[in-house]
Amino acid sequence: MTHWLIAPVVMPALLAPFIILAARYHIGIQRTVSVAGVVAMIAVALGLFVQTADGDILLYQLGDWAAPFGIVLVGDSLSTMMVLLMAVLALFVLLYAIGSRWDQRGRHFHALFQFQLMGIAGAFLTGDLFNLFVFFEVLLIASYGLMIHGGGNKRLRAGVQYVLFNLLGSTLFLFALGALYAETGTLNMADLAERAALIGAEETVGIRIAAVLLILVFAIKAAIVPLHFWLPSSYSEAPGPVAALFAIMTKVGAYAIIRTYTLVFPVDLEVTSGLHGTWLLPFALLTMAVGAIGVLAARKLDRLVAFSVIGSMGMVMVAVGLFTERSIATALYYIVHSTLTAAALFLIVDLVRQNRKSLRLKLEAPVAGAPLISAMFMVAAIAMAGLPPLSGFLGKLMVLSAGYGEGPDVWIWAVVLVASLLTVVGFARAGSVVFWKAKAGAAPVPAEDAAIPSGLAFVAVGGLLAAIILHTVFAGWIFTYTSATAARLFAPAPYIETVLGTAGKLSDAGKATGQGYGGDAAAPADQTEKKGDH
């Protein structure tokens, strides 16, 4: 058992109260502690990523209590990849927040930022559904605080809308957990995987309801149409660095769907068969279409980027909805691309916001630093629209390849290509109005009045764009990694054996008395016998 596995959860959980209690009025100390914490998290996440890259599965039993009764964190190649992605994203976002001084517009930015990282990391690493619910609530509370950071009526209104939608999701999540517990007597995902497979055809109602409720909850998090209404207002009204960090929030929903529906409710499970292809895939295509139309119809730059996030989530969910090894590998590749690109775009929008009267797509004077900002916007827009040669184009080709010969491939190809075309037109129109035609709009802002963004802000955006380029250059190696990860997701026996077969306090007692789940090879057989009784 490695104690490093719990570090991405514990480190921000300790740093946040330290910042509040010891450095509340010292922004310099807050920044130093926050950056040091994120750098340390990257180092830990990188170590966990390397350790699990070859298929090893790490288990951390809190208090040494054995699963399924104890709380466990599980690190495999999927969860450690997502934690590493989150940590890298957090560093660039944090640098931007410091460089643009967003972190000085409220007293608790860094503390809330750390709590947010704690919730996201916990959601990726947890091994049971109840703690997934708990971490969802942690990141919801922290994200609401970050969203209204800096004040303003519009921001407060968008924050309330965001919280109401997510509270609806939390309520559905509780109903789903109740139904699952009533049917199986456990919420540990590995244990659920075994018990769900034992449920007979005559007892499927409860488990079907739970499976549908869960996919609804995760669809709200992933902003899948028609459960996407909270995203455009929330993301466009949030402070720039907060919206950039939120780029990974929708990926938490995608991650939860991939994890739950490969481990607990796999495609070949009779009681939940048809849920992916019949329901998820059509709504994913609709999500992509709505996102592209939103990009084309947007009248403000921030809402245009918010709708492009919806469109990219549609692309991810199309790959997930196909639910083959190849499509899941594609979805994982696209998740990394989409997260980095959306974050870069939100930060660029914030750079534009600093020297423009509004973000409406109308002719105004050129913004300070326009040549560099427009170049950054062009790179990020090319990536998001899926034009060559960046990772968005490669990801789109992977989705088209994964969809070929699978289900309604004509619809998949048609929606992907048309949506990409609409997205290209939308971004081209925005870039033309905001940057390339700006000189015709009004006289340039006098140099003494122009607020040129800081160098650190440009470094942060440049870092994200560099990460997108690296994601393109190393696409072959990354796809090999995601393919191996997808293969392991579709063969979850080692995951289940590691979680349920590792000895802990209760399992040791069970071995001594002949009851409970043991930490030896005989444990699964004993467990199966117990479930039969259940």
Image: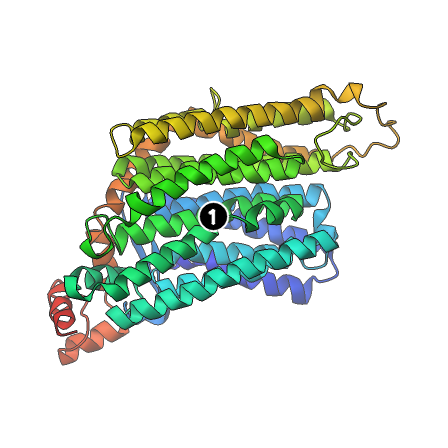
Q: Position of residue 262 (x, y in %)?
A: 27, 49
- In the depicted structure, whether residue 300 falls above or below residue 43: above
Q: Residue at x 86, y 23 (%)?
A: 443
Q: Is residue 520 visible?
A: no
Q: Position of residue 365 (x, y in %)?
A: 80, 26
Q: Position of residue 6 (x, y in %)?
A: 42, 59
In the image, 410 versus 450, the foreground residue is 410
- In the displayed orientation, state which residue is furthest to the bottom: 513
Residue type at numbered disc 1: Pro
In the picture, the quarter occupied by the N terminus is bottom left
Image quadrant where residue 162 sits:
bottom right
Q: Residue at x 25, y 48 (%)?
A: 274
Q: Residue at x 72, y 36 (%)?
A: 359
In the image, 347 versus 111, the foreground residue is 347
In the picture, the quarter occupied by the C terminus is bottom left
User: Would residue 107 be found to the left or right of residue 327 on screen?
Assistant: right
- In the depicted structure, whether residue 382 falls above or below residue 188: above
Image quadrant where residue 307 sits:
top right
User: Would residue 440 be found to the left or right of residue 37 on screen?
Assistant: right
The residue identified by callout 1 is 226
In the image, 246 versus 27, the foreground residue is 246
Element under disc 1: loop
Q: Residue at x 53, y 33 (%)?
A: 293
Q: Is residue 21 visible?
A: yes
